[in-house]
Image (cartoon, rainbow, N blue to C red):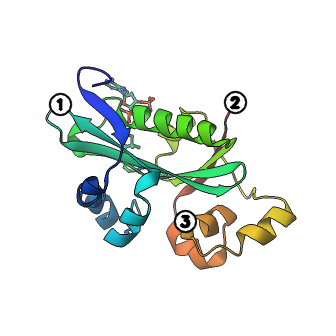
Amino acid sequence: MTNQEFLVRRARTSDVPRIQALVEPLVQQRILLGKDLVVFYEAVQEFRVVEDANGDLVGCGALHVMWEDLGEVRTLAVSQDWLGKGVGHALLGRLEADARELGLSRLFCLTFEVGFFVRHDFVDMGSETVDPAVYAELVRSHDEGVAEFLDLARVKPNTLGNTRMLKRLV
Ligand SMILES: CC(=O)SCCNC(=O)CCNC(=O)[C@H](O)C(C)(C)COP(=O)(O)OP(=O)(O)OC[C@H]1O[C@@H](n2cnc3c(N)ncnc32)[C@H](O)[C@@H]1OP(=O)(O)O
């Protein structure tokens, strides 16, 4: 355990059903986008999870690389019983460390939890996007998160009410 209460670790394939179960109530509330199990398995290397002293999975979060310098924090979720106990902070810190290790300098997220991310030095992107040459490359992606980053019209239903936020890693 990294402290007496919980451990942040890399996800394993055996965690995937528990990650989906953790996220499901938030999908029902339209806070997070629903994903099929196969999509979670394909992304398992992107995930960090938090387990409590009983080995129960109480949090998850993922880092998705979009471009040379750019990544996205995805599927950051903490179970109801563990909210406000530093699990989200620990997960985001680990994902940021992963991002630095990969050589990224900017982190994107799309969220309703603006206060939490502001307190972690994310800022509202407004209508900011990227330079035209990079835009032309990114727009070729089939990934929904990239489309959300670019603020494309086809993903407006996903972004409605959410805030596009960015953090520059130093
Ligand atoms: C990119 C995306 O995935 S966007 C989606 C973001 N996720 C969601 O919207 C899903 C729903 N929300 C959640 O699951 C959670 O609210 C999260 C992930 C946003 C935050 O998770 P939490 O574990 O509650 O965060 P954490 O406990 O670190 O911080 C929340 C507050 O708890 C308090 N807190 C932090 N550590 C402790 C602690 N050790 N003891 C008591 N309280 C604490 C602080 O007041 C903190 O406030 P701060 O934001 O000013 O630092």
Please state if 161 lies on the left or on the right of 59 as rendered: right
The answer to whether residue 33 is visible is no
Q: Amino acid at mark 3?
A: Thr
The answer to whether residue 63 is visible is yes
Residue where numbered disc 2 is placed:
170
Residue where numbered disc 3 is placed:
159
C-alpha distance separating marks 2 and 1? 33 Å
Residue where numbered disc 1 is placed:
53
C-alpha distance separating marks 3 and 2? 27 Å
Q: Residues within 10 Å of mark 3 (few under 14, many from 20)?
A: some
Question: Residue drawn at (73%, 59%), measured in percent from left and top?
Answer: 127
Q: Quadrant of residue 54?
A: top left
Q: Quadrant of residue 64?
A: bottom right
Element at label 2: loop
**Farthest residue, direction left:** 54
Coordinates of residue 101 in the picture (x, y in percent):
60, 37
Coordinates of residue 113 in the picture (x, y in percent):
46, 46
Q: Nearer the viewer, residue 160 or 4?
A: 4
Q: Amino acid at mark 2?
A: Val
Point out the image quarter for the C terminus. top right
Q: Residues within 10 Å of mark 1 (few under 14, many from 20)?
A: few
- Considering only order in the chain, which callout, 2 or 3, is on the residue closer to the N terminus? 3
**Farthest residue, direction bottom:** 154
